[in-house]
Image (cartoon, helix red, strand yellow):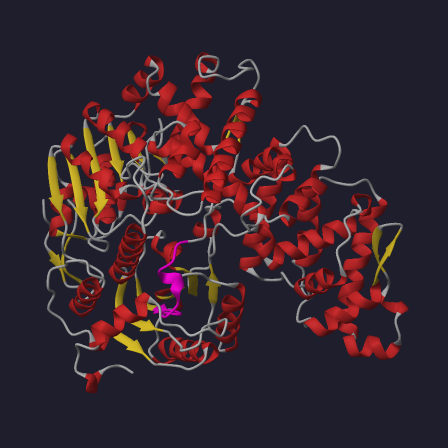
Amino acid sequence: MVQGRTPHHPGYYALPITCYDQFNIMKYSEDQLNLINKPLESKIFLEGPGGTGKTTAASGRLLHFLSEGVRADSILIIVPQRTLSLPYTEVLKGVGLPAGGTVTVQTIGGLAQRMIELFWPAIAEKAGFRNPELDLTFLSLETAQYYMARIVKPLLRKGYFQTIKIERNRLYSQILDNLNKAALVGFPHTSIGERLKSSWVGEKSQERIYEEAGECAVRFRSYCLKNNLFDFSLKVEFFFNHLWTYAACYRHLTETYKHIIVDNIEEDTPVTHDMLAEWLPHFKSALVIYDTEGGFRSFLGSDPVNACKIKEVTGENIIFNKSFVTSSNLRAFACELGRSLHRIKEKETGDIRPVLIFKPHRYHIDMLQWVSEEIEKLVKEEQTKPEEIVVVSPFLTDSLRFSLMNRLKEKGIPVRSHRPSRALREEPEIQCLLTLAAIAHPAWKNLPNSFDLSYALMQAIEDLDLIRAQLLAENLYGKKENKPFLKSFDTISTALQERITYIAGEHYEILRIWIERYIEGPPAELDHFLSRLFGEVLSQKGFGFYSSLEAGDIVANLLDSVKNFRRIIIDNEEKSLGQEYIEMVQEGLVADQYIRSWIFEEKNSVLLAPAYTFLMSNRPVNYQFWLNAGSMGWWERLYQPLTHPYVLSRQWSVNRPWTDDDEFDSRERALYRLTQGLICRCRRKIYLGFSELGEQGYEQKGPLLRAIQRVLSKLPQEKLNV
């Protein structure tokens, strides 16, 4: 079966020549090839740390199945998050599949939705829906927040949640998160409040908050059942509680799919594990992949401990230990850092000094300058591809993103950022579009202030700085009869026109006249308006979105969001849907995850991202920069007064108090997994960016920095990369 070693890939082997020729696939290691060529009816549990080639081997086994004549539509691939499906969808793009079907690549939520659409009429009434004869509607995260707001706002006026300070959008999303946890862990949503209360040991006022959060969850579920609305939690619960036990659905699934690949099972949820434990014996073949250092999505319900029980229903256990990514020096650093965080790890031989580079700084701005200079050296002096560099931090704030991106762009280095689960209003491009939309629809009586318009114009017009944008807004923006309007550039003095510049004034006039002509006609749907505004004005030469792939991606996501909102929200008679949407965004609507942002991102550019976001892209790079290593953000959990990711898990006993010791242990374990995951995805060097004073001016001495200092204190000091 083995073709032999190649000079360009020492230690690697090609697939059987027929398979290699047909699919033109990459080379594999001997261990990978052994797994790929296992008998077609094998059931395998594959485990190992990140970077050991598990997903690559699974992709190769998928192609091997197809080359052996296995029907594509009999293969099911389950991943916990859509971004983790990309290695499989990419490898399938180059495969000429025969007619008759395609490989199914799904999350458990996607599979649940497909089955609900198929079997809805047969099971709806039994599941408790009050109007089973009517159509069903699937809610995205955005539209679920909208309907949750309908439930919660009247209760807020009655005094609910008075003892906590939290933004409305976070309040809505945390109640939805409680419902998701109940569905994914497998306990009744009616017990959410009691479960949270049973583990609370602090002030009694918090118990009332948990009760109110539980009541909101119950009310929202009742509203969904009444109106045939499926948020994520109801979709999962409906599938597992009703369809999985429904004979016709069960028969359809077991007869349709004969081969299964489950990747990153440690990032999936207990109810998924339960289903797989019952389903796997019915498959002809199975490959289940477990990352031994994973569990990054525990705050979203993943359960790596529960995932291990799948070993019991697979016939063979294979372990990949050899990393194709990290060097022995980086593995030594991972080992010593694990020991420093009090996690027992086998000793690894290697020299940490060549792979760990750092330089102490007094101020945060000096650290950013050092980072940008080091990236410039890598790209321009060492000829490193920008895509082989990633900059991570616990949180990627607007100021941090802006400062570092500007520095890199000034040096001619392409850079992109990725920040999922942000409020839509936090994206400057979206703020620009929606501010202009409010001005173009005076009947909404939504009056942006001059500050909002200044920032909108700064985004809309190329090379327009904030000072000139403010001059335009202060002198040319007016309000009449509670309606906004824009004045002509010709109405201001010549001196002011010269200060703003005639080029900027010309582009302002093009924008103003376009909006004026739009107002004269019948109003369009918001997504149609935004599409025209972007295509006819803002993406043209001289305007801010011209030749910006990132802006185009953000606008495309916004259009999808508005279309989905218009498709689902159909019963609001008081306001136009466009007005309702803008008001919802202004309240801080948290955006959906758009897979387009991962697929069509600009490839050859430095990536700036939160650490967990980079980990869930599951790709290695040559160089990593860990920013703000002294920040408590690496250690602390997000402020979530309405929920608790560990208490609402299968690994926590009801009525067991959550103590300070539990909190400390969970944070230390999370930091260990995070740092190990990052190191496993680095090929050459890690740069530590830290400063005595952080972004807000406070002293930084967080647990990650202290753990690294304990590692460094054991090394000879004369050759450290300082």
Quadrant of the image occupied by residue 368: bottom left
Residue for point 11% across, 60% down: 346
Which region shows up in magenta? 625-637
In the rendered view, tell whether residue 542 sits above or below residue 584.
Answer: below
Q: Nearer the viewer, residue 272 or 343?
A: 343
Q: From the top left corner, tell me how far across and down residue 508 is, in percent.
A: 77, 64
Q: Which quadrant holds the C terminus?
A: bottom left
Quadrant of the image occupied by residue 123: top left
Q: Is residue 357 magenta?
A: no
Q: Nearer the viewer, residue 78 or 299?
A: 299
Q: Is residue 629 magenta?
A: yes
Q: From the top left corner, tell me how far across and down residue 279 is, in percent.
A: 24, 25
Residue for point 52% across, 22% down: 225
Q: From the top left corner, tell me how far across and down residue 413 is, in percent.
A: 46, 73
Main SS, magenta residues: loop
Q: Which quadrant holds the N terminus?
A: top left
Q: Is residue 84 visible?
A: yes
